[in-house]
Image (cartoon, rainbow, N blue to C red):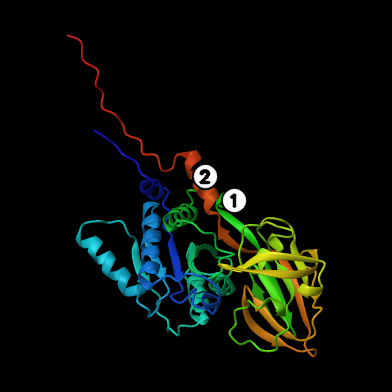
Amino acid sequence: MVKKTSSFSISAERGVTKVVGIIANPVSARDIRRIVSYAGSLQVTDRANIVLRLLSGLAATGIEEVVMMPENAGIRGHLKRNMMRAANMGEARFPKLRFLDMPVTGQAEDSINAAVMMRKLDVGAIIVLGGDGTHRAVVSGCGNTAIAGVSTGTNNAFPETREPTITGLAVGLAVTGQVPSEVAFFFNKRLEVSINKHREIALVDVAIVNDGFIGSRAIWKTESFRELFVTFAESGGIGMSSIVGLLAPVDRSSPYGRRLIFAPKNGSAKTVTAPIAPGLLESIGIEKVEKLLFDQPLHLTVKAGTIAFDGERELSFTEKDDISVTLHEGAFRTVDVTACMAYAASEGIFINHRMQPNNSKQEN
């Protein structure tokens, strides 16, 4: 007899059954930066196919059920058709999929509300399809529930670019306990902006511009840049944080962030050319860059303007407002996909062992 053990049976033997949530923003990567730069845009079928690849990875690790945010752009219909076709062909490669019972507005509040509902359902993790803004919305509602990002936005400074199948595998390994939690999960920094008694968060950067109106929300006019706060800034990143990344990089695990003060480009002793959007490189004047420490509120040097959170203008302010920016450590959890897959390889989780039959000949 040949006996085969798979990663699915390993999970089942441990008695672990987890539900995973998926929040797929159907309209990410559709802001004005697509017009002023060369950013791409995923079609509905592309987004649905990403979800199918995630589901395949989750199923391979023993995930039996997935809950998903509903939408009216067509992702849901595409998923149902493909999953029904797979079932009719006898391909049991997807977990059970159900959609949350919630209203659909097509706004960022959908992602926030879905994250709150998934947190209350005690899902093991939430996989997010979107850009920096979508991930920010989910983090504002998910509490201590870990997230895993899939890049489908314009600027994707926070979610790492990776094949969705691998993300599905890693999330499944993490939430079923096949990878220890101290390996599987990573605690992230976060910026918090206090405006009078109102608070907003950012995952990557908070930018201060001197425009007095919100307008198209996305920022790209460099002459209006005044201050920038970042949780991390990678030399190979894109968006506002890339400016710091090319001056004084700081990684996601460093125990500090950065604060940058801009200067007029024509009157600055130092400028940096940075990719503030896909295909859009601008020369920007720099006055100084300094270390941003944890739990130390800093006030702005600008008296009036607007505040952009992770690349999108959200709030305007005047000299009458009391504003501070604070960097916090260990603010939310993500699934460490690289660490999960490395652990799986070192432990042979995906290796199938077969018991070979005894071929020795009996002596006469």
Depth check: 62 or 86 in front? Answer: 86
| Nearer to us: label 2 or label 1 | 2
Sequence-earlier tag: 2 or 1: 1
Q: Residue at x 77, y 88 (%)?
A: 321
Q: Horizontally, is 23 left or right of 209 in the view?
A: left
Element type where label 2 sits in the image: helix
Locate residue 96, reporting x and y percent. 33, 64
Q: Say if 234 sits above or below 347 in the image.
A: below
- Residue sitting at the far front: 266
Locate residue 324, reporting x and y percent. 77, 77
Quarter of the picture holding the C terminus: top left
State the residue position of label 2. 342
Q: Taking the image as drawn, is residue 6 in sight?
A: yes
Depth check: 43 or 82 in front? Answer: 43
Q: Residue at x 48, y 74 (%)?
A: 28
Q: Which mark is residue 110?
A: none
Q: Amino acid at mark 1?
A: Glu
Element type where label 1 sits in the image: helix
Residue 104 position by quadrant: bottom left
C-alpha separation, residue under disc 2 versus residue under disc 1: 14 Å
Q: Horizontally, is 101 left or right of 285 in the view?
A: left
Residue 319 position by quadrant: bottom right
Locate residue 111, reporting x and y percent. 50, 76
Residue 252 position by quadrant: bottom right
Graded by Cα atoms within 10 Å as few (under 14), some (14 to 19) or many (20 or more), the crowding at tag 1 reads few
State the residue position of label 1. 182
Q: Amino acid at mark 2?
A: Ala
Q: Residue at x 54, y 80 (%)?
A: 32
Quarter of the picture holding the N terminus: top left
Q: Residue at x 73, y 68 (%)?
A: 327
Q: Taking the image as drawn, is residue 180 in sight?
A: no
Q: Say if 281 sits above or below 320 in the image.
A: above
